[in-house]
Image (tube, rainbow, N blue to C red):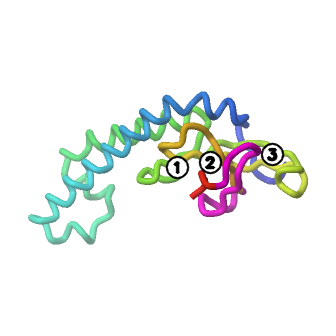
Amino acid sequence: MGRHRFEKLFSPDEADALIPRLEVLIRDLQVQASLLRKKVNDLARFDDKLSDIDLPDVIARYPELQPIAARMSEIASEIEEMGCFLKDVDQGLVDFPFLIDASEADEEDQVVFLCWQYGERRVVAWHAIDSGFSDRHPLPGAAKPLLN
């Protein structure tokens, strides 16, 4: 099963069951990220050194950003507590560890990631743990045009 170990392995049905909750969480996370970017951009108009500072330091410097950052952290933690991996906020990418059988992986049974993107009604693809979204393969029964 490879060198990767996960507390939970998902079936496609188990991953699909989480999508309604993930849709709410990802949308909230995207709204918070957009709000944080806007506020940082607004602050940068008055603080020309802001572009040279890492985001955690910007948040420490401007306490009014802390509630937004805290909410983003709460959402990310809730996603991770489900056993999922948040991969990209803006694209809404979430991965689920999955044991794929040899016939699908063209090798031996291995742990891969089921890959879901915000807006998809169900999980339709997987990719190797060491690759990413651009290397997605369709799950059996998923139409290839659904893959980005």
Q: Residues within 10 Å of mark 3 (few under 14, many from 20)?
A: many
Give coordinates of residue 89: x percent, y percent. Answer: 43, 50
Q: Mark 2 sits on what residue?
A: 115
Q: Residue at x 69, y 31 (%)?
A: 13
Q: Residue at x 53, y 42 (%)?
A: 120
State the residue lying farthest toward the left: 46
Q: Do residues under tags 2 and 1 come within 8 Å of each other at their CB atoms?
A: yes
Which structural element holds mark 2?
Answer: strand
Which structural element holds mark 1?
Answer: strand
Q: Mark 1 sits on what residue?
A: 93
Of the residues shown, which amino acid type is indicated by label 3?
Ile
Q: Residue at x 21, y 57 (%)?
A: 40
| Pointer 2 or 1: first along the chain | 1
Q: Residues within 10 Å of mark 2 (few under 14, many from 20)?
A: many
Instruction: Specify start and end residues of the magenta stretch as a single range.
Output: 128-144
Is residue 74 found inside the magenta-colored segment of the image?
A: no
The quadrant where residue 122 appears: top right
Of the residues shown, which amino acid type is indicated by label 2?
Cys
